[in-house]
Structure formats: structure tokens, C-alpha cells
Amino acid sequence: MMAVKSLLFLALLASAYLTPSEAQYAQVSSTFSQTLGPLGVGSHLTYDSIDALSGIEFNAGESNFTIVTPGAYFLIAAPQVGFGGCSVDTASFTADFWVEVNEVAVSNSNVRLVASSSSTDVIVTQGVYVFNKGDTVEVVGSGECSIVEAISPGGSEPLIPSIITTMYKL
């Protein structure tokens, strides 16, 4: 009897996990460089490559994800930031990135990079967010003399996207 109860428990436990077709996740990236909006204002970053997508609405060439299933999600955005889009000679650049939900900036989602004009770096904004059905989610970038830069390293190395954003339902 104990073995039957154990098997029943394991079967119930296994049924609690989602199959891949029921999971909610997205990973998108951009194969082109993008100039950031002005500091304090920003612009929505766009993506032309859908690397993986299930249960979240997204169209290549756009900037916004639409939540289909409400709940808690983990989101991580990792832009490749460099110097560019500047008409003045300067020794440094500044770039900020944050998350917007329904076109409203999310508190405590902003990150900043200040670097020399000769450097390129990846900066990460991440967090756990509770979304409702129909919410739109976007990553925003602003800066002075900064771009998110797609880099083609050559040889057999793959392209370094200007930004990769991943989210999944917890």
C-alpha cells in the first residue's frame, strides 16, 4: 500500500510540471545596432530575431511583449553598449536601461553604465515582475553618446547581438 501511495504521489508531482508546449517564455535579440534616446526620455529597443517563443506574444521588428498568462515572470535584458551617435568629441558615454509595463517605467528597474569612449560592455537589467493578462512589456534605453551595438566578430564566431532579452514565467 505504501508503494502505491508513493507512486501516486510521484505521478501527481510529475503532472504539476508544464510540458514545453505549455510553458511561457521568450528569448529575442537584435542583429542591428540602435541609437539610444536622450537621457531621461529613452527609446524602446526593437528586436528582429525570435530565438525562442512560447505562450508570450511577440512580433519580430517590434519592441513589446504581450503577456498571455498572468503571473510572476523573470526578465533579463542584456544590451551590448558602446560609444556612438554623438556629434561632439567626448571621452566617455552614459547609457541607462529600464523596463516599462504598459508604457509606465517600473520602479527600481533602471541600470546605468558610464564608460570611456573606447570601451564596449554588456550591462544587465533583471528582475521578477508580476504581470496581468494583456500587459505590454518593453525595454527602454537612453543615453549620451551611446548605442547598443551589434558586432560581427568574423571567422566562425556568431554575431554578437546588440541586445538579448529573455523572460519566462516562474
Image (tube, grey):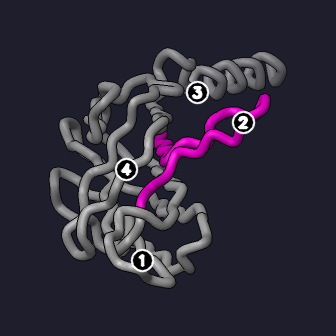
| Residue range corresponding to the magenta coloring | 147-170
Q: Which element carries disc 2, helix, strand or loop?
A: loop
- Name the chief secondary structure element in magenta: loop
Find the distance from the CA under tag 3 to the CA under tag 4. 39 Å
Q: Residue flagged by tag 3: what amino acid is it?
A: Tyr
Residue type marked 1: Thr
Question: Does the magenta-highlighted stretch encompass residue 168?
Answer: yes
| The N terminus - image quarter | top right
In this figure, which residue is indicated by the disc labeled 3? 17
The residue labelled by disc 2 is 154
Q: Are marks 3 and 4 in contact (CB under 8 Å)?
A: no
| Labels 3 & 1 near each other (Cβ < 8 A) | no
Q: Is residue 51 left or right of residue 152?
A: left
At label 2, which amino acid type do we have? Answer: Gly
Secondary structure category for the residue under label 4: strand
Q: Nearer the viewer, mark 2 or mark 4?
A: 2
